[in-house]
Amino acid sequence: MYFRLLSALFAVLAALLPVARLAAVETVTFRDQNREQTVVGRVLIEAQDGGLLFQSRDGAIYNIEPDNLLARESDDAAFEPMSQEEVAQSLLAELPEGFQVHTTANYVICHQASTAYARWCGGLFERLAKAFDNYWSRPPRSIETHEPKFVLVAVVFPNKDSYVQFAQDEVGAAAESMIGYYSQRTNRMVLYDLTGIAAGSSRERLSQREIVRILAADRGGLTIATVIHEATHQIAYNSGVQRRFADNPVWLTEGMAMYFETPDLRSSSGWRTIGAVNKPRLNGFKSQMGSWTTADLQNMISSDAAFRQTATARTAYDVAWALSFYLIKRKSKAYCDFLKAHSLKNRLDWDTPEERLTTFIKHFGELEKLNTDFLRYIQRLR
Ligand SMILES: [Zn+2]
């Protein structure tokens, strides 16, 4: 009897133990790209082989292989995200000299840009974050969102050269062809001052509208679209709408960012509307619609491969926009349920192509019929 009671007690304790451990602060030292790093944070997942998915107090996530884990120490204190002040100090210590900090309610913008540009970014990001939250949490949509738990960071370099030099470490050679990115690993946006106006110059006091005018002149608004796009990724992963390091089909993640990215060049922030028709993407998809089949749809749903190859990436993005636009507008409830299901997925648990397909069909129905309706809907858009 006692034995049974005791073993039942142990079973309860064993079930509780990992939970208790997850909340405690730990300090880990590990090798990361041949550098040794010591980070304070919490364990998100501990693998059986001793590998860790570890989150530092600034929100970054590190996937630490057991061979690279050098030391690990735990503390009784509870895990607490860094404050804005702590984040700002840590960024200033990490980045080259000359950076300044601009803070808004949710963001710390560490920049070497003109003050006007930093302020424009802050205003745009806050506006987007609020609209993003409203959009998903209010009827007819019903996604449970929350305030960001970590300070949202944007690092803004003064020019393309300094940006590329920094970004190469994180994204490799691709840095050259991107004007900004959001990293799921660091949880930061990295950008540069796209106005080309040096900090401290006589044009430092540009108005917000003038900034939009300068940016709009560059590739017809595509520049602003990219900034909004990256900020959408960041807020999606920080408001509970998506989960970092979990299985998110690329068409879903990219389609959502493109759904929000359409700039509004008449507005002083450069952005006002959600879910306007994204003309470059629509034209891109329309030009290939003639040969689009259900098998193509099936490929996109079950695999991210088309996004990874230069030859097919552009087309894949166009399709991701069109498909997401169609699903959000026409199958809103099913899309929200699909999104919610993905936000609850376990981290580091990657679906097989068959699992992705099954989940998609479970939410949206048979592909043949869906594809016909999808093409008909897109065909009518102007
Ligand atoms: Zn993207």
Image: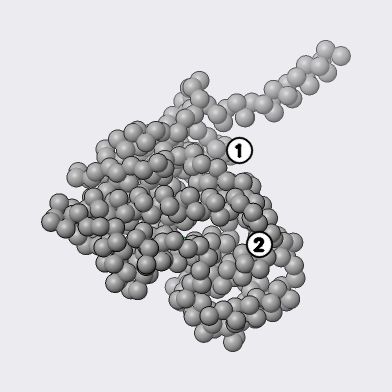
Task: Name the residue beneath numbered marker 2.
Answer: 332
Residue at 49% across / 39% down in the picture? 149
Q: Is residue 254 visible?
A: no
Query: Residue 242 location in percent, x, y?
Result: 56, 51
The amino acid type found where label 1 is placed reads: Gln
Crowd around label 2: few <14 · some 14–19 · many ≥20 (10 Å): some
Q: Is residue 54 visible?
A: yes
Residue at 74% across / 61% down in the picture? 362
The colour scheme applied to this rendered structure is one colour
Image mark count? 2
In the rendered image, the vertical position of residue 372 relative to residue 83, given as above or below: below
Q: Is mark 2 within 8 Å of ligand 1?
A: no
Splitting the image into 4 quarters, where does residue 106 fall? top left
Give whichever of discs 1 and 2 has the lower sequence position.
Answer: 1
Give SS at disc 1: loop
Give SS at disc 2: helix
Cα gap from disc 1 to disc 2, whole angstroms = 40 Å
Task: Name the residue beneath numbered marker 1.
Answer: 48
Query: Residue 238 location in percent, x, y?
Result: 50, 46
Q: Residue furthest top?
A: 2
The amino acid type found where label 2 is placed reads: Ser
Residue at 48% across / 50% down in the picture? 130
Q: Please report contact status of discs 1 and 2: CB closer than 8 Å, yes or no.
A: no
Residue at 61% across / 38% down in the picture? 48
The label shown at residue 381 is none
Query: Residue 182 location in percent, x, y?
Result: 42, 54
Query: Residue 333 location in percent, x, y?
Result: 69, 59
* Quadrant of the image containing the N terminus: top right
